[in-house]
Amino acid sequence: MTSKSGKEYECYIPKPNESLSESDSKNGKSIDIQKLLEPMYEGSCLYKIKDWWTYELCFGKAIKQFHIEDGRIAGEILTLGLYELDNKWEDELYEEKFERVKPHHAQSYVNGTKCDLTGLPRNTEVKIFCEEDSLDYINWITEPETCNYVITVHTSLLCSHPLFKSSKELHTIVCQPSGID
């Protein structure tokens, strides 16, 4: 590299310090994700109002949908799913899960209220994302198929896990005179 005055410099980007081995970081065995999320299971339910509906997500229990009018629930309370499981991390799924989408932890909620359009029970996938310095909150609710929902939740609880650390690390470029004049 050459400065405005024509002086030559050699520059390099230092390698980042790696506190975890690649295999620990890849398979997530160094930190138990469910343990990190324990405060969400023990804490209050999360709520989100979207259009006509209010959604209630109680971790490890159930997801409900209802309408509030004049401060009271008006009409039927629909169950969008009962907690079934936390999806397990599998080494062979790592590439598929994390190379194409932002890392997240997923839970399945099944056997909700019967859908009047399909005759099948309602089901929901909850996707939990790391958001630094964030309180727990429902970010988005969508219904990609009739009576099948996806809810995204953001929390800072996952951010200490190696699989959720940002890959966008900042590096300082170090330059020094090259000794060539």
Image: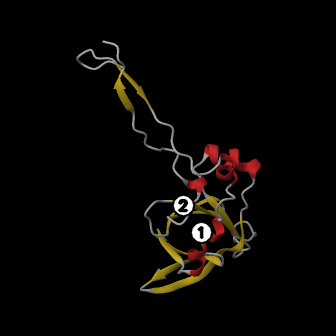
Q: Is residue 162 left or right of residue 12?
A: right
Amino acid on which the number 2 mark rests in the picture: Ser
Residue visible at 23% across and 17% down in the picture:
5
Callout 1: SS: helix
Q: Nearer the viewer, residue 58 or 86?
A: 86
Q: Quadrant of the image for the C terminus?
A: top left
Q: Position of residue 108 (x, y in %)?
A: 69, 66
Q: Position of residue 96 (x, y in %)?
A: 69, 45
Residue 153, placed above or below residue 170: below
Circles 2 and 1, Cβ within 8 Å, touching? The answer is yes
Mark nearer the N terminus (2 vs 1): 1
Q: Nearer the viewer, residue 82 or 148?
A: 82
Quadrant of the rendered structure where residue 158 is?
Answer: bottom right
Residue visible at 48% across and 71% down in the picture:
48
Q: Is residue 130 left or right of residue 115?
A: left
Residue with the most extreme top position: 181
Q: Is residue 160 left or right of residue 31?
A: left
- The residue beneath circle 1 is 36
Q: How many dots with numbers?
A: 2
Residue visible at 35% across and 17% down in the picture:
179
Quadrant of the rendered structure where residue 99 is?
Answer: top right
Residue visible at 54% across and 60% down in the picture:
160
- The residue beneath circle 2 is 160
Amino acid on which the number 1 mark rests in the picture: Leu
Q: Nearer the viewer, residue 164 or 119?
A: 164
Q: Is residue 73 left or right of residue 9?
A: right
